[in-house]
Image (cartoon, rainbow, N blue to C red):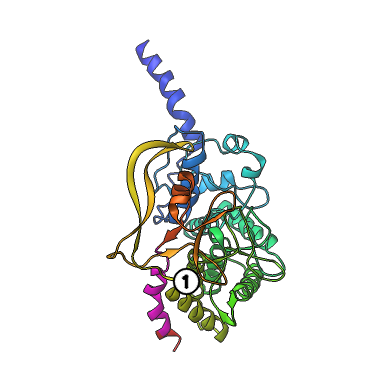
Amino acid sequence: MNGFIKLIIFIFMFLPGLFLYPQDTSLKPIPYISLEKFQDGIHHWALFSKIRKYDKLDTADVFGIANNLLAYQNNDGGWPKNIDWLAKLNADSVKMSLSVRYRSSTFDNNNIFPQIEYLSKVYYYTGIEKYRSATVKGFQYILDNQHKNGGWKGSDVDAITFNDNVMTGVMDILLDIVNGRKYYAWIDKKLKQQLSEAFNLALSATLKCQIEVNGIRTAWCQQHDNNTYQPVKARSYELPSITSRESTDIVLFLMRINNPGDSVVLAVENAVRWLEKSKISGYNYARVKIPEVKYHETRVDYDQVFVPDSTAKPVWARYYNIETNTPFLCKRDGVVVYTLSEISFERRVGYAWYGYWPEAVYREYSKWKEKTK
């Protein structure tokens, strides 16, 4: 009797997992594929999801992760944002627990392009058709959602969007295809041509968006108008401005282009000059320990401060006034302020108002200069 009971327990506890996440022992091992580009979405899941207890896939379980990506892919070829791609959960149940907006496909929060890249690598290493088919559907989502001006948008505003790597994330993938990355070698001639044309349109739009002040090109806003290419507002606290974080991502992307034309070189040079002009010395942006408090669906034990420190390395504000280049911050209601202490706790720990992003540009810039001589 005891043996029979143990058998029943085994069936109910373990066999469902075998059906949900089957292990095909005939599949050859493939290299580890990085999940770094998924971290933004996973982070937002941890903040906002009400589903708190569940088992997780190992980060090296490439097939389990790839099958999760297939399960969450929408009919339009895209994916919902803010999903834990390691979660051992029923994808349909998770999606139905979300509002219509949040189960819809979107480029927000570094979404769509990580799934496409991951699945393409899995197909490259395995040749399994379902991964190729899903990747092609993802590419079609990119093509279907590109505006005639070359831009892609997030879900907050219908504009050419650089926030959340909407533009740069997609363009990075397209540049990898143009440059002949091996894990995109399977793409057929027709699709490759379409993606190459999409890349050229997006690059042109990006260059047109670079903000000019008193006849001098500077850097970029988080989002730009579809017709005039001028900076525009998105969420209430994301005002027209010059933004160091998004501009950093754009410059890093532009520096990846092989044999760049004069317009690309000039865009990089002008942006680097603006970054140098805009750095802030004598202040430290740091976390300080506090008693643990509830924060959305999780808890945090830190606050963010911006304090005088003569020994600190240069830091950059997220936002700069377009005309005066003065750093500023913004409350949720759209009111402009100039000190971090005027921002609510929820926004201080939930948004990057200052950062060290341009350091990545400086690390690459000298090497880029040598290549473009």
Secondary structure beneath dot 1 equals helix
Any part of residue 201 in sight: yes
Give the residue at the far left of this rendering.
311
- The x and y percentages for residue 191 are 65, 67
Task: Reply above or below: 45 against 158.
Answer: above
Q: Which residues are magenta?
A: 356-369
The quarter of the picture where the C terminus appears is bottom left
The magenta stretch spans residue 64:
no
Give the residue at the far bottom of this rendering.
373
Q: Residues within 10 Å of mark 1 (few under 14, many from 20)?
A: many
Residue that mark 1 sits on: 252
Give the residue at the far top of this rendering.
1
The quarter of the picture where the N terminus appears is top left
- The x and y percentages for residue 252 are 47, 71
Q: Residue 205, located in which quarter of the rendered image?
A: bottom right
Viewer-side residue, 128 vs 311? 311
Viewer-side residue, 120 vs 167? 167
* Image-based side of 311 in relation to 41, left or right: left
* Image-based side of 78 in relation to 7, left or right: right
Task: Reply above or below: 276 against 84.
Answer: below
* Image-based side of 366 in relation to 327, left or right: left
State whether the magenta stretch is mostly helix, strand or loop.
helix
Q: Residue at x 39, y 44 (%)?
A: 58
